[in-house]
Each structure stands twice: as structure tokens, then as C-alpha cells.
Image (tube, rainbow, N blue to C red):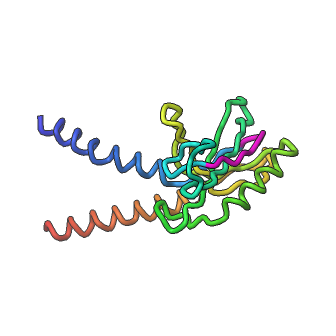
Amino acid sequence: MSFRILAIAVVAIVAPIAAGLHYVLPRHDVVRIVNTEVRRVDASGKPIGSGDNPATSRDVYYVYAEDVDDRSPRVYRNEDTGWGFPFYFKFNSADVQAVASSIAAERGVALVTKYGWRAQLFSWFPNAVSVRRWDPADTVVPWFNIVFFTLIAIGAVWLTLKMRRRVR
């Protein structure tokens, strides 16, 4: 009985942490960019109508793409993260959009580095952190994630050893 409670507690703690890490850590997609767009939206992210107050609005860039292998559609939001969380310190969304537009004009293949989730029900899109031309023969190695999880594992081992010494 106590094992079940321990397992449930571990899942209840680990699942939200894993979901949070999956949301904020960078992931890569190799896609063919087909179009780009700029939308004027209000503070909540809804498109601005003709009678709305433009003073409280902002531009949001979108990149439309399709998966190179199965041609499934992919849509990315391209917004600056600024100084806020997650800490990508992205201030170049216009430059990223220019690169995406250039690749879209030639229907080229690109490597999109992104974070976030696509939730069609809520119209959520992952945020494209960077877009660059890509040769499909190349491979993607997620170096940041490898280093991040290696440091987490080292920290966990160190903490475990420290706790064992304290218990003895």
C-alpha cells in the first residue's frame, strides 16, 4: 500500500515538472516554410478589428510551415520574449521573420528552434526562437538540452550522496 502512495506522490511531483520542462526547453523542427504573416493583436492576443483601440495593440509575427517528411502543417508564433520567462532574451523577432520570409519565398527548408506547445483548442502556437536555412541531410543535436539534463543529473547525484552522508 505504501508503495502505491509513494508512486502516486512521485508521479504527482514529477509530471508537472516534466511538463514544465517540455514547455520551456528548446526543441527543433525541420520544416519547409510556406508563408509568413504579421497580425495586429490586442493585449489578450485577439486580432484587432476596425473599431478597436490600436494604442493597446502589438504586432505578432506568424510563420507557416509544413513538415518535410509527412507534410503536416506547422504554425509558429514569432514574438520577443524580452526579459521575461522563459529566459531566451529574444529581442529580434523582426529579424527572425525576415529570414523566415526569405526562406518562404524560395520554398526552402529551415530549422526552427522553438519552445511551447501547439493547442488548437486554445489557438496556442509554439514560439519560434530562431529560424535558419537547413540542409535536410544534416542532423540536429540538441546541445542545450543535453548539457541541461547532464547538469541536473550531476546535481541529483551530488544531492543524493550528500543526503546519504547526513543520514549515516
**Residue 151 at what x, y percent from top left?**
44, 65
Q: Is residue 36 magenta?
A: yes
Q: Quadrant of the N terminus?
A: top left
Vertical position of residue 89 compared to residue 138: above or below: below
In the rendered view, tell whether residue 71 sits above or below residue 22: above
60 over 162 or under it: above or below = above
Task: Please name the residue shown 52% across and 41% down the image.
Answer: 124
Residue at the far front in the pictured view? 51
Asked if residue 95 lies left or right of residue 16, the reply is right
Q: Taking 53 as reference, is 70 left or right?
A: right
- Residue at image point 67% right, 64% down: 92
* Front residue of this view, candidates 76 and 24: 76
Q: Residue at x 23, y 40 (%)?
A: 7
Residue 59: percent from left, percent from top: 64, 54
Q: Main secondary structure of the magenta part?
A: strand
- Report if residue 35 lies within the magenta region: yes
Q: Is residue 124 left or right of residue 75?
A: left
Boundaries of the magenta span:
31-40
Quadrant for the C terminus, please.
Answer: bottom left
Q: Position of residue 94 (x, y in %)?
A: 71, 60
Name the quadrant containing residue 108: top right
Place of residue 157 in the rendered image (x, y in percent of width and height, measured from the top left):
34, 63
The image quadrant of residue 71 is top right
Q: Quadrant of residue 95?
A: bottom right
